[in-house]
């Protein structure tokens, strides 16, 4: 899949989709999932979800606010409800969601995976590691609050998660895809969209390899050594970026975290990242110390670089047209039902529709 970059604002909006709209979103999402699995397979559907622009277009087509943070949570919610019904039929499943629901992701993955005979541990590891990277190894000021995990019978997966920066009333969405993933800790994202962050500590950037190599070495040193070096660092005259990094690091409070990393004796950065209790502040302190002790700097590069179909919940570009929405669902239902009976003419017509809009 080609790399897509750019910046897009996703304002934080309150409220939820009304019942009449969300029920339609679930029905339309179900037909879209059935159609795409019939035409392209579940692997392609996961690839599409991992494209932040395609995902945005899907949310707009389903009728949610085209530019709000709620598009992410509501679209994932509609897909999850749709897959609860048709997932076992096509071999595609969803877990996780917003807030407390996201913490049940491992349990939900296990439920579907064990039922379908899919190996569970790699999926749970992928879910946990993607969440840990975006909450601790990539520090861009956005707090993760939504984590959705999609996977199929072949063990392929996609993650769509979102963070918020309440002070700026903005959100950022992160997309992951198992296909082509070489490392969880080196440029792992399929795409990131959101508001550009003013300050970023990016420990998963390609150019942060020196820091990733030395941070585990540092974490193997006794906690009292790390605390002593951190206190010394706080009294140095540092450039602005370091002042920002160290402003809320308390060496004494981190001693317990350092004890855990010391006991873990992790062999590399990915294993260290999985140590329970090691969060953003602990990693920030270790990144600072790796530069002080070993001269290995981290990266400060920010990775972030269809609503006319049915309208939008808030009336943009126009209020949702319920009649058109219901006709769209009916057309897809009929085409998919007939295709299952071996009559694929209507699916052929749907495939040819884009030809009408091509330039001569």
Image: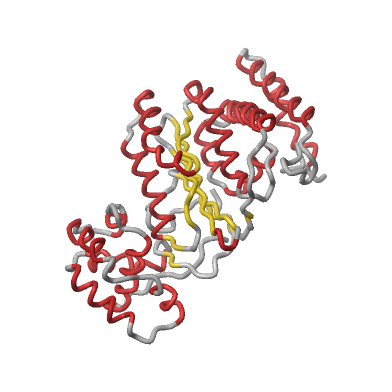
Left or right: residue 317 compared with residue 108: right
Residue at screen point 52% across, 28% down: 83
Mark count: 0
State the image coordinates of residue 346 (x, y, percent, origin top left).
72, 22
Above or below: residue 172 compared with residue 232: above
Q: What's the residue at 74%, 31% (across, down)?
A: 352
Query: Residue shown at 44%/75% (left/top)?
Result: 244
Q: x and y percent of residue 339 in the render?
A: 64, 18
Of residues 256 and 146, the one nearer the viewer is: 256
The quadrant in which residue 95 appears is top left
- Quarter that holds the C terminus: top right
**Image point (51%, 45%), residue name:** 160
Position of residue 35 measured from the top left corner of the image (x, y, whole percent): 61, 27
Q: Looking at this view, is 201 or 341 the one in front?
A: 201
How are the residues colored?
secondary structure
Q: Is residue 301 above or below residue 190?
A: below
The image quadrant of residue 321 is top right
> In this picture, is 28 found above or below 65?
above
Residue 1 placement (x, y as % from top left): 54, 48
* Residue projecting furthest to the top: 341
Going by the image, does 79 lie left or right of 186?
A: right
**Residue found farthest to the right:** 360
């Amino acid at each position: 899949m080609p790399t897509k970059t750019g910046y897009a604002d996703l304002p934080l909006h309150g409220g939820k989709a009304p019942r009449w709209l969300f029920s339609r979103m679930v029905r339309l999402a179900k037909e879209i999932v059935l159609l795409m699995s019939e035409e392209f397979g579940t692997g392609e559907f996961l690839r599409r979800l991992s494209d932040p622009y395609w995902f945005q277009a899907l949310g707009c087509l389903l009728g949610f606010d085209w530019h709000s943070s709620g598009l992410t949570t509501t679209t994932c919610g509609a897909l999850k409800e749709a897959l609860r019904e048709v997932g076992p039929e096509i071999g595609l499943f969803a877990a996780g969601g917003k807030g407390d629901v996201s913490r049940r992701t491992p349990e939900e993955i296990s439920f579907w995976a064990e039922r379908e005979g899919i190996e569970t541990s790699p999926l749970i590891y992928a879910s946990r590691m993607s969440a840990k990277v975006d909450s601790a190894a990539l520090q861009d000021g956005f707090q993760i609050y939504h984590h959705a995990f999609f996977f199929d019978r072949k063990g392929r997966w996609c993650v769509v998660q979102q963070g918020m920066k309440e002070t700026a009333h903005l959100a950022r969405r992160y997309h992951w895809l198992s296909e082509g993933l070489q490392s969880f800790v080196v440029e792992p994202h399929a795409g990131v969209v959101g508001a550009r962050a003013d300050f970023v500590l990016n420990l998963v950037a390609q150019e942060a390899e020196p820091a990733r190599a030395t941070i585990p070495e540092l974490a193997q040193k006794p906690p009292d050594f790390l605390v002593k070096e951190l206190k010394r660092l706080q009294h140095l005259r540092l450039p602005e970026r370091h002042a920002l990094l160290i402003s809320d690091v308390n060496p004494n409070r981190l001693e317990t975290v350092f004890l855990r990393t010391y006991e873990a004796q992790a062999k590399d950065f990915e294993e260290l990242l999985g140590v329970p209790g090691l969060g953003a502040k602990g990693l920030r302190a270790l990144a600072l110390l790796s530069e002080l002790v070993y001269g290995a700097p981290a990266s400060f590069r920010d990775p972030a670089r269809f609503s006319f179909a049915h309208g939008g919940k808030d009336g943009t570009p126009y209020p949702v047209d319920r009649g058109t929405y219901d006709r769209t669902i009916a057309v897809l239902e009929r085409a998919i039902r007939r295709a299952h009976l071996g009559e694929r003419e209507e699916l052929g017509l749907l495939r040819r529709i884009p030809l009408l809009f091509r330039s001569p």
